[in-house]
Amino acid sequence: MEVPRHAHRARLHARALVARAGRRPTFGGAAEHARGAREVAVPWSLAAAIDNGHGFHLALIYPGDANGMRLSMVALDTNGRPEQHPDWSSRPGMIDDVHLVRHGAAIVAFYRGGDGGDRLLERDVTRIGSWGQNPPAARDHGRLRQSEAILIRVHDGAPSAEHVPASAD
């Protein structure tokens, strides 16, 4: 069976994201770490990935419909099997520049979103919701210009995000 081209890109992207998070890019346990990394194909457009303590949380970009894109979440077990169908974690609009942060047992998504893609939004995505159901509105941290980047800080164990000028480097 041939793997769709977008699934291959998602695998590479997931591997890079997990590696940047300071963990070897594997979906296995300690024995798997000893044998080396392996890839797990995911058939979705991947925006971010993070270790959730028992596998991985994946932030996906769902292309949506005429109303706009959506942030969707799905959890994978340590073998890379989805634990549920991806949900709708955002209202429709533009979705870009997604960051996942784990603090304690919670997973928080910070992203560029809104109707024009010019808002810094935050949503607790710890619990995977349902497909086809609009979630409550995300927490809005204000306008995010194209010339600004998202900076995430953790203070006293709680993550927060702010707007900073994007570097020309």
Image (cartoon, grey):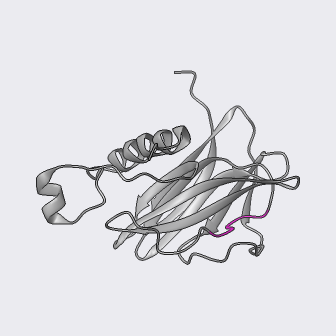
User: Is 149 located above or below residue 162 in the figure?
Assistant: above
Q: Is residue 88 covered in magenta?
A: yes
| Residue in the image at 72% along x and 67% along y | 138
Q: Which residues are magenta?
A: 87-91
Question: Looking at the image, which residue sits at the far front?
Answer: 1
| Residue in the image at 70% along x and 31% along y | 147
Q: Residue 164 lies in what quarter of the image?
A: top right
Q: Position of residue 76 (x, y in %)?
A: 43, 67
User: Is 15 located above or below residue 106 in the figure?
Assistant: above
Q: Main secondary structure of the magenta part?
A: loop
Q: Nearer the viewer, residue 163 or 136?
A: 136
Q: Residue 125 lies in what quarter of the image?
A: bottom right
Q: Position of residue 3 (x, y in %)?
A: 47, 44
Q: Is residue 66 covered in magenta?
A: no
Q: Position of residue 120 (x, y in %)?
A: 70, 52
| Residue in the image at 17% along x and 49% along y | 36
| Residue in the image at 32% along x and 65% along y | 79
Q: Taking 70 as reference, is 23 left or right?
A: left
Q: Nearer the viewer, residue 47 or 8?
A: 8
Q: Taking 121 as reference, is 100 left or right?
A: left
- Residue 157 appears in the picture as rendered: no
Q: Nearer the viewer, residue 36 or 16?
A: 36
Q: Position of residue 159 (x, y in %)?
A: 51, 63
- Residue 61 appears in the picture as rendered: yes
Q: Taking 77 as reference, is 98 left or right?
A: right
Question: Looking at the image, which residue sits at the far right?
Answer: 66
